Structures are given as C-alpha cells and as structure tokens.
Image (cartoon, rainbow, N blue to C red):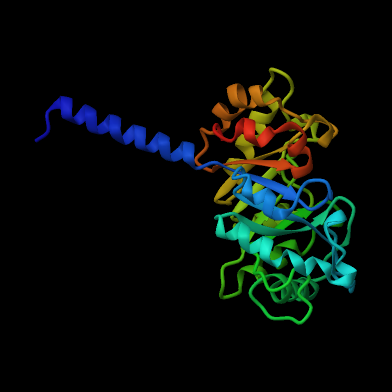
C-alpha cells in the first residue's frame, strides 16, 4: 500500500495533468476570405496562431440558385481563379489546421426551401469541396475538412436536414456553426439540436444583452453557461471581434479576456477556445498573438 505522502504526490500529479490537459484543449478559429488585404491563406496558417480557418463565404446557394463562392479580393471565382488555393489549403492541413468552408454570411443570397433542397446542397458541397468528385470544384482538388454554418438570414428551416445529410457520408465531415449568443439562435437553433456539430463558436458580439461590458462578466457568463449546458456539441468556443471596429459592439480587450473572461469560461468541460472575426482585423491588432498562450 502507498503511504499518505505517496498518495498525495500521485493526486497532485493527476491534478496537474488534468489542468495541463484542459489548458491545452483550447484553440483559436479565424475567418479568412473577406478582405484582400489580410494576407494569403498559406501566410495565415503559417502564423501558428490558428487551429481552424473558416473560408468565408459560399454566399449563394439553395432555392434553385447556382452556388457561388465569394472570397472578396483573394480570387475571382468566375474565371476559376480560386482553384489556385488548392496548394494553400493543403499546406494549412499539413500544419494540422482544419480548413472549413463557411456557408452563408451576413450579405449572401441563400436559403433552404425543403428537405430535398438541403439534400441537393449537401450533394453539391460534398462533390465540390469535400470528398466527392466534380469537374467544377471552385477550390480545386483539395478536400476541405468540413462545413461551417454562418447562417444569418431566412426562416431557419432545413438546416438540420443539411447537417444530417452532410454527416451521412462515409468520410468524416466536421460541422461547425456560428450562432448569435441570444439563445436559442433563430437560424441554426434547430440544426444544433441534432447534436451533430463538432464546434460551435458563438458570436458574443453585436448582441449587448449577452456580451461582456467593461468589468462586467454577468451577461456573458450567464449566456455561456446556457450554451454549454443546452447544446450537445463537443466544443463550444467564444466568438469575438479581433478589433474594436470589427463589430458594432462586444470587443473585449486582451487583458480583460485573459484576466476575467477566460478563467470563468474554462470551467466548462465543453470549452474549446476562441473564434475571431476576422484575419484582417487580427492583423491590425495582433489579438490572436496576445491571447494564444492563454486560450
């Protein structure tokens, strides 16, 4: 039998290991693609700051529309120029970064009109961005890791169908979503109830009732606890603007995030890290570099 001293040592080692494991469990997700001045995708992944990169956005799809990707000043999809991203996507993945296609956004033309419409969109995504085959793959032959649901318009119907169809393929398709912090999200709330999502980076900005205000954690903490207790996703992440002008409200100075917010939200077993909007704004402030060692 072990002595009390030895037992204490073993317990201390286990606690240290668990704490270390939790501390290493957080990552940073970034949105890239909506500003031509934010550097290349390869440069983004080469920073070593990000674990997930969301390519923003597939902004037109569903409802009989021809799907169209919009990566702002990075490439022209109409001339098939975005296929040049193939090697950059692969370089990111070689560094262990998951590269997701974000569908939707705040200014797109998209909807799902029926379960059949959702099935058709899932088939399109699979064949053109994931493990399927197509002669018209907008980003070339690179196989993305998954699909991010940044749905901010429409009636909120059939996104659960889309999640189920995407999860039905033989190869793993990671699913993420970026709901607003008021619970439940009016657009993807139903989809999140499927329990199929791997990552949910909740937007704790542009929503004053559930975001942090200087020195006051109450609203954010209450909303965070609701999200982490009610959603069956494996990882819940804190979505933030990377600069004061990246959003209308909700910016948290890095010092406040490190000293007040992260210690509170890390208590959840579902804590997965921080999501930032966006790479362009992160370049302006160095936000991810400031928080990386604390996330």
Tell which residue pokes out farthest to the left in this image. 1
Instruction: Give the total of numbered labels.
Output: 0
159 to 216, vertically: above or below: below
Say whether residue 214 is visible. yes
| Residue plotted at (15% across, 26% down) | 4
Q: Residue 229: where, in percent of width, then height?
A: 57, 42
Counting from the top left corner in percent of width and height, residue 206 is at 82, 35
Find residue 207 and report its image quarter. top right
2 on left or right of 89: left
Q: Residue at x 80, y 29 (%)?
A: 244
Identify whether 230 is placed above or below 60. Answer: above
Left or right, 78 with reference to 269 = right
Depth check: give the residue in front, 178 or 68.
68
Out of 130 and 155, give the one closest to the viewer: 130
Q: Quadrant of residue 142?
A: bottom right
Q: Position of residue 288 (x, y in %)?
A: 65, 36
**231 horizontally vs 105: left or right:** left
Left or right of 27 in this view: 40: right
Q: Position of residue 14 (x, y in %)?
A: 31, 36
Which part of the image, by quadrant, shows the C terminus?
top right
Which residue is at 69% across, 43% downward?
202
Q: Nearer the viewer, residue 268 or 176?
A: 176
């Amino acid at each position: 039998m072990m002595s009390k001293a030895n037992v204490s040592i073993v317990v201390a080692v286990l606690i240290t290991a668990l704490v270390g494991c939790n501390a290493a469990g957080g990552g940073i997700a970034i949105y890239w693609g909506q500003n031509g001045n934010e550097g290349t995708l390869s440069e983004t992944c080469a920073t070593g700051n990000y674990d997930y990169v969301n390519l923003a956005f597939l902004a037109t799809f569903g409802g009989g529309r021809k799907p169209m990707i919009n990566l702002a000043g990075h490439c022209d999809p109409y001339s098939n120029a975005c296929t040049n991203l193939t090697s950059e996507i692969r370089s990111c993945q070689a560094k262990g970064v998951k590269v997701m296609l974000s569908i939707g956004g705040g200014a797109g033309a998209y909807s799902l009109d029926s379960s059949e419409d959702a099935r058709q969109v899932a088939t399109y995504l699979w064949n053109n961005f994931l493990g399927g085959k197509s002669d018209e793959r907008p980003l070339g032959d690179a196989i993305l890791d998954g699909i991010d649901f940044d749905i901010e318009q429409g009636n909120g119907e059939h996104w659960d169908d889309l999640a189920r169809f995407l999860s039905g393929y033989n190869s793993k398709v990671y699913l993420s979503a970026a709901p607003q912090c008021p619970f439940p999200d009016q657009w993807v709330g139903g989809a999140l109830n499927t329990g199929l999502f791997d990552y949910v980076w909740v937007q704790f900005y542009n929503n004053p009732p559930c975001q942090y205000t200087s020195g006051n954690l109450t609203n954010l903490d209450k909303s965070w606890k609701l999200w982490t207790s009610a959603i069956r996703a494996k990882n819940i992440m804190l979505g933030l603007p990377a600069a004061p002008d990246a959003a209308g409200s909700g910016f948290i100075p890095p010092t406040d995030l490190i000293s007040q917010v992260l210690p509170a939200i890390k208590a959840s077993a579902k804590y997965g890290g921080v999501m930032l909007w966006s790479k362009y704004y992160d370049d302006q402030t160095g936000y991810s570099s400031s928080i990386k060692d604390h996330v």
